[in-house]
Image (cartoon, rainbow, N blue to C red):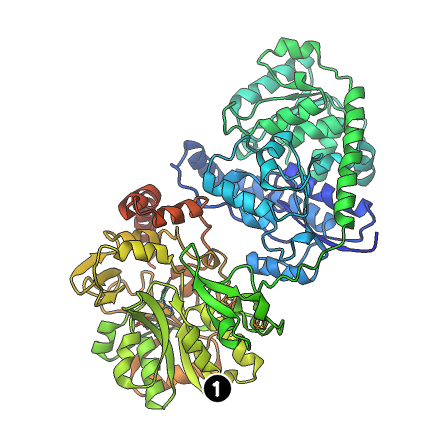
Amino acid sequence: MENKKIAIITWHAYNNYGGVLQAYALRQAVSKLGIDNVDTINYKSDPPKVFRKIRFKDLATKFLVRNNKVKNLVQQNSSKFDNFREHNFTYTKRCENATELFLLNDEYDKFICGSDQIWAPTVFNENYFLSFVSDDSKKISYAPSMGLPVIDNKYIKEQIKKLISKFDSISIREEQGKNLIKDFTDKEIEVVLDPTLLLNKEEWNEKFKLEENNNDYIVFYCLGGKNKHYKIAKEIAKILNKRLIIIPGNIFDYRREEVQNVSPEEFLKLIYNASLVITDSFHGTIFSINFNVPFITLKRFKDNKLSQNSRIYNILKKVKLENRLYNDNIKDFMENININFNECNKIIEEERKKSFDFLNNAISKDNKNLGNKTITNICSGCGMCAAVCPTKCITIKLNENGFYSYEIDKERCIGCNKCKKVCGQLSTQINEIKEMKLYSAYSLNEDVLKHSSSGGIAYEISYYGVQNKIPIIGCIYNLELNRAEHIIVTKEEDLLKLSGSKYLQSYTVDAFKEILKLKQAIVIGTPCQISSIDRYLKSIGRRNDFILVDLICHGVPSYNLWEKYISKYKELDDVKFRDKKYGWRTMTMSINSQYHKNENKDLFYDLFRTQVVYNKSCYECKYRAKTNADIRIGDYWGQKFKKEKNGISMVIINTLNGQKLIDKLINDNKIKADKQPIEDYFKAQQTINDSMPLLYNQIIAELKDEKTSLKEISKKYCKKELRQNKIKKIIYRIYSTIKGR
Ligand SMILES: Cc1cc2nc3c(=O)[nH]c(=O)nc-3n(C[C@H](O)[C@H](O)[C@H](O)COP(=O)(O)OP(=O)(O)OC[C@H]3O[C@@H](n4cnc5c(N)ncnc54)[C@H](O)[C@@H]3O)c2cc1C
Ligand code: SF4
Ligand code: SF4
Ligand code: SF4
C-alpha cells in the first residue's frame, strides 16, 4: 500500500484504561497494514450540556475529589496515563475546536473515527462523525459503538442519519448498532471487532512484557462503583483464598485498601496474570477473553431501553461465553470457574481477519477528490468572504437554525481561494490576551454613558474617528428588517445609532464591501467579524491603516428566538437590549420605550444567558481569550466595580495603535482610564466555551414551531439552570467578600 497519512479521532485523552488501550490498538492495527504515518487527533471534547437534576452520586463524586488523599491518587493516576500516551502515541497538532480539526484536511489522506462509544446519542458530538472532513471519500468509521439499543430523540437521530450517510467506508462494533443505522446509508455496514482484539495475546505480551509467574490474585475492575459488586468480589476471593486487587474504575475505588493505582501497561499485566477477573467493564471483559483469563462479568446497568449493557451481551454472545454473565448465584460460578477458550479463540481469529480486511480495503480505496467548496466547517457568518469574492458567487443568508452563514453558487466559483484567505475561522495566529494590558475606563460625557451599554468607550473611539474624518463601521438595529446590521457612519449626528449592544448576529456584507474601497476606517464588531477583517487587511498589507475594535463576546442567539420574541409586537419603533433604567449591571430589555424587563424576568434573556441557542460557532469560539483587534472592549463585570452605577468598561490593548488611541482619549479628557491587572479579564469574563446542548436541534425546532410558546421553552430548558446559576453567584459573592476581592 502506498504510504498514506492517516488521522484517527477517538477518545484517547480520558483516563480510562479501555479507552486509551483501544485508541492505542487501532493505531497499531493500522500500522500493521504497512502505514507508517498514523496520528491520533489531539482533540478532547467536553460532554454536551444536558438538562437533568443534580444526582446524589455527582455530588458525592465532587465531594470525594476534594479529599486530599483521593486527589493525590487521582493525580498520580493521571500522570501514569499521560506517560503512557507520551510513549505510545503520535499526535496531530493540538485541535481545540472544530475549525482547528478542519485545518487537518490538507494534511491527511484518510480519517478514521472509532472505536469506543464515540457515536453514543447521549454524548452526541458531530466531530466524532468526521463532520470536519470536507471530502466524504476520506471518511472511514472503524468500530464506533452506539452504546445504546435505541436512539430515542428524533432530532439527534436525524443528525446522526445525515452524518452517517456521508461515510465512504463504514463499520460498527455491535450488531445492535448496525440495526440502528442500517437505513441511514446505502453502503454496506460491517460489524467488526473492538480494536483491542485486533492484537492477539502474543502481540500484547511482546509489546508490554506482560507475562509474570505470580497469578495468586483476583482482579476487580468495575466502572459502576457499586458496593454490591465489591461485596461479591470479596466473597469470591475468600472462597478461592486469593488476594483481591482492585484496579480503580471509578473515584469510589480509591477509598478501598485493595486498590492499586496502575498505569495502562500495569492494568494489562494485572489482567494477563490474574487467576480470575471480576468486572462490569466492556474492556475488562474483552481483555480477559483475549488473554484467556477466567472472568465474571457483572451487570453495570439495569436492563431497560437506555441500558448500556447491550455491548457486553453482544461480545459474550459472539464468542459463545454468555454463561460468564453473573446471575446472582455465586455457587454456580464457583463450579464453572475455568473456561475452555478454544472455540472462543477460533471465533476471534476469524473475526480478526474480517476486521483487518475491512480496514485494509477502506484505507486502500482511492480518494475521489469531490471538488468540495467548503470555506470552513464552522461559519460565524461574518460576511467577509462574500465581500471579497471576485465573482460574487457567495451569499450570506439566514439558515434554518436562524443564523447568517455562507452559501456558494458552485457554477460561478472560479476556485481563486480568496474566501479562504480572509476567513477568520481559519486563522491560526491569534494573540493571547494574557500577555496584554488592561484598563477600567468610562466616558466623561454623561449623555454618552446613558446611551451606551457599559462605559461608552465604543462611542468615544467612534467620535474620535469622525472628528478626524475616519469612517466608522459599526452595528445598528434595523427596525425595518428587524435585524442587527453593520453600516458606515461618517457624521457625528449618526453616531448614537451605533451605541448599545444588539445581542444578535449582525448582517455585515454591504458595509464590509466598503472596506475594500476605504483608505482607513475604524471597525467595531464581534471578534469573529474583526478576525476576518484583520486577515483581509494583512493579506493586502494595509492592516496599520485601520483601527479594529472587538467586543468581549459570549455569543449570538438564533434569529428564530428573536422572531418568536418580537412576534407579539405589531410594529417596533425602538429596541434597546441594554437599557440602563435599573442600572448598568442589570441587563434590561426595552421595546418601544414601554416594555422594560430586567434579565431575570425577560424570556429573551432566559435563553440568551443560558446559551442554549447560540450559533454553532459560539460553542467552538476561538476568541474567548485571544484577539487580533487593536483594542477589545467589554463590561467590567466582577466585584471590583459593583458600586458603579452608570457603566464601566474593560479595555484590553493589543497593539501600539490601540495604545496610542486610548492614550489620546485619556489626554483629551474624553475618558477616565486606570490600569488594572490582566487577571481581572480571566476572573470576570467567560474564557472557555460552553458546551452545545445535547438537545440543541430540538430547542431550535421548538422555536420555529408556532404552537410552542417561549415561556414553555424557557421553563423546559432554562429555568433550572438559571436557578442553579443564581445559587452559584451568591456562593461566589460570599466567597469573594470573605477573601476581600
Ligand atoms: C453579542 C454580544 C455579546 C457580548 N458579550 C459580552 C460579554 O460576554 N462580556 C462583556 O463584558 N461584554 C460583552 N459584550 C459587549 C458589551 O455588551 C458592550 O458592547 C461593550 O462593553 C461596549 O460597551 P460600550 O459602552 O463601550 O459601547 P456600546 O454603546 O455598547 O457600543 C457597542 C459597540 O458595539 C457594536 N455592536 C453592537 N451590537 C453589535 C453586534 N450585534 N455585533 C457587532 N457589533 C455590535 C456597535 O457598533 C457599537 O460600536 C457583548 C456584545 C455583543 C454585541
Ligand atoms: S474560491 Fe474565489 S470565486 Fe470561489 S467562492 Fe471563493 S472567493 Fe468566490
Ligand atoms: S469568512 Fe465569515 S461568512 Fe465567510 S465562511 Fe468564513 S466565517 Fe463564514
Ligand atoms: S462567541 Fe465567538 S463566534 Fe460567537 S459571535 Fe462571539 S466571537 Fe463570534
Q: Is residue 82 above or below residue 642?
A: above
Q: Is residue 527 left or right of residue 116?
A: left
- Which quadrant is the C terminus positioned in? bottom left
Residue nearest the viewer, comparing 14 with 62:
14
Which quadrant of the structure image shows residue 314? top right
Residue 717, horizontal then vertical, whole percent: 35, 44
Q: Residue at x 66, y 19 (%)?
A: 322
Residue located beneath label 1 in the image: 545
Residue at the far left: name it: 594
Residue at position x 58%, y 52% in the image: 131
Q: Which residue extends farthest bottom?
A: 468
Q: Position of residue 400 (x, y in %)?
A: 43, 55
| Residue density around tag 1, few if under 14, some if 14–19, many if 20 or more, within 10 Å | some
The structure residue drawn at horizontal position 60% and vertical position 64%, both measured from the top left corner, is 373
Residue 667, can we see it?
no
Asked whether 335 or 368 is in front, the reply is 368
| Ligand 2 quarter of the rendering | bottom right
